[in-house]
Structure formats: structure tokens, C-alpha cells
Amino acid sequence: MRTTVTLDPDVERLIRNAMKDRGVSFKEALNQAARAGLRPERPQRRKKFVQPSFHMGAEQYFRWDKALAAAEAMEDEEITRKLSLRK
């Protein structure tokens, strides 16, 4: 099919660059660009996320359900120690 189109200067520059890079005619470069731009995009397959985990041994002496309370206690101890050094 033959038709007349008006290309923006930046688009013309892109087509001309594609012509030089690929060694094709203006018509072929324009057709390739139109095909690439108008094809329905396939969703890219995402790599499945896997969270690494590590075995912590058979015996656990720490209660992980009380971790926040333990962190607060350690923070309180550190604040108390720093305040005692200021005297």
C-alpha cells in the first residue's frame, strides 16, 4: 500500500539511523519499526521469588515470639548505660 505520512524530525532521524545500522531501505526500516511498535506485547515472565531460609539447629533456647520484647529490653539497657556515662 502506498500512502503519505509526515514524520517528526526525531522519528525520521531514528528511521535513518536504523537504515544505516541494519543496512536496509527507508521503507523496510519504517515497516520494521511499525511492526515492532504495533505488535501486542507479551508479558515478560518473571523469575519466581524464593526467600532463602536456613536451618537453625534442633535446639532453640530463644523464644522468637518474644523477640520484640527482648530488643526493647536490650535497647533500654543501652540507654541506661549511656546515661550513666554522662554523670
Image (spheres, rainbow, N blue to C red):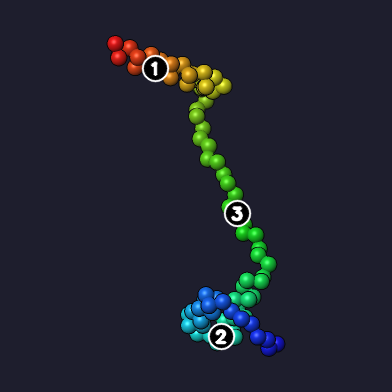
Residue 16 rendering spot, x and y as whole percentages: 51, 81
How many residues crowd around disc 2 within 10 Å: few (fewer than 14), some, or many (20 or more)? some
The residue that mark 2 highlights is 26
* Vertical order, 15 against 87 (above or below): below
Could you say which quadrant of the image residue 33 lies in? bottom right
Q: Answer yes or no: do the residues labelled 1 and 2 have beta carbons within 8 Å?
A: no
Front label number (1 vs 3): 1
Residue 44 rendering spot, x and y as whole percentages: 62, 59
Q: Nearer the viewer, residue 49 or 13?
A: 13
Q: Please tell me which residue is depicted at 57% across the width and 81% down the height of the picture.
A: 29
Q: Three-letter amino acid code at disc 1? A: Ile
Could you say which quadrant of the image residue 79 lies in? top left
Residue 75 rendering spot, x and y as whole percentages: 43, 19
* Quadrant holding the N terminus: bottom right
Q: Earlier in the sequence, mark 2 or mark 3?
A: 2
| Residue 61 can be seen, yes or no | no
Disc 2 from disc 3: Cα separation: 36 Å
Disc 1 from disc 2: Cα separation: 73 Å
Disc 1 from disc 3: Cα separation: 46 Å
How many residues crowd around disc 1 within 10 Å: few (fewer than 14), some, or many (20 or more)? few
- Specify whether 66 is left or right of 82: right
* Vertical order, 31 against 64 (above or below): below
Q: Earlier in the sequence, mark 1 or mark 2?
A: 2
Q: Secondary structure at mark 2?
A: helix
The residue that mark 1 highlights is 79
Q: Answer yes or no: do the residues labelled 2 and 3 have beta carbons within 8 Å?
A: no
| Residue 8 can be seen, yes or no | yes
